[in-house]
Amino acid sequence: MDFVIKESFIQGKSSIDACEDGWIVTADYVAVVDGATSKSNFEIEGSTPGRKAMEIILEEISKLSPGLSVFDAITFINEGIIRYYKMHHILDEVSRFPEMRLTASAAVYCHSRNEVWLIGDCQCRIGEICFQNNKKVDRVLSEMRALVLYSALQKGFSIKSLRKNDIGRHFIYPMLKQQYVWQNNLNSHSEYCYTVLDGFPVDPSQVHIIPVDSHSVVLATDGYFDLFGTLRETECVLLNQIENDPLCIGMGYNNVNMSTKGVIPGNYSFDDRTYVRICRL
């Protein structure tokens, strides 16, 4: 192994037991995986679809042969998810209803190919340059939520009351439940289509393959608005953002830290988060 893990951190937004993030390191791969937040009450084997997706994908990554192309790796991972659907007799259902699928995003470092792969909305930092793969549908819904909450603040609602009763989240929730129509949708060329790992074919043009030309590589889920070269700095900036804008509507940050959800009272953050820093030797 010609790389080492210099730092790693994982934190659920409410607790580690409920965390839908995970990460893994093998002889040739390092990956962070972010299970998608469920928009329904569907559970399987006592887990949310997001957590189960994360667990299956980490297991499949542990079996990957060294040096695979990103698309061979995606095919291998998706085959594992399909086997799970078949084993639990839900393949027909998830084919018809994408909202039931085991869905996750991933950022994968392949050492032998000197590449980072962004599949879905995870992110990375290579040297001094950050790369994100955000969904347009999330940007649009985040702005809609922010508009509702900013309007409420103008009417005299307090941040405290809106954290307890996020009327912006309630407003966009029907669209959050309907966004699955765009998930791995190969029949449309709409800018709202997005790619994830859910067992079904992906649009190759939406998978980001980034050459690695630095000794330092950071992989992270989208629980961070900004990525820095150390965990300490990344965490400090996030905690400062949360303190100043717990609703996550871009207050004071030029809309940088805008999300489809805020920090619920009692939670650690607006989302689960994982940070892994790799040093290439």
Image: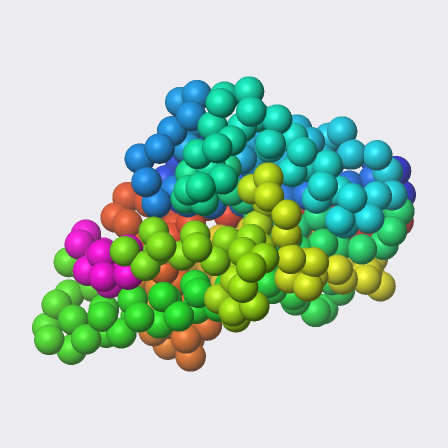
Residue in view at x 35 percent, y 33 percent: 42
Q: Viewed as shown, does residue 85 lie left or right of 37?
A: right
- Magenta span: 163-173
Total numbered circles: 0
In the rendered image, residue 130, in percent from the top left (x then y), is placed at 65, 67
Q: Which residue occupies the foreground of this view, 64 or 26?
A: 64
Q: Quadrant of residue 162?
A: bottom left
Residue in view at x 32 percent, y 40 percent: 40
Residue 187, compared with residue 71, is above or below; it is below
Q: Quadrant of residue 174?
A: bottom left
In the rendered image, residue 66, in percent from the top left (x then y), is placed at 86, 38
Residue in view at x 59 percent, y 39 percent: 199
Residue 177, compared with residue 167, is above or below; it is above
Q: Viewed as shown, does residue 144 lie left or right of 105?
A: left
One can see residue 135 in this view = yes
Of all residues, the one furthest to the left in this rendering is: 156
Residue 69, compared with residue 91, is above or below; it is below
Residue in view at x 53 percent, y 35 percent: 53
In the rendered image, residue 98, in percent from the top left (x then y), is placed at 45, 44
Which corner quadrant holds the N terminus?
Answer: top right
Q: Main secondary structure of the magenta part?
A: helix
One can see residue 51 in this view = no
Q: Viewed as shown, does residue 183 lie left or right of 164?
A: right
| Residue 198 drawn in magenta | no
Q: Viewed as shown, does residue 124 lie left or right of 190?
A: right
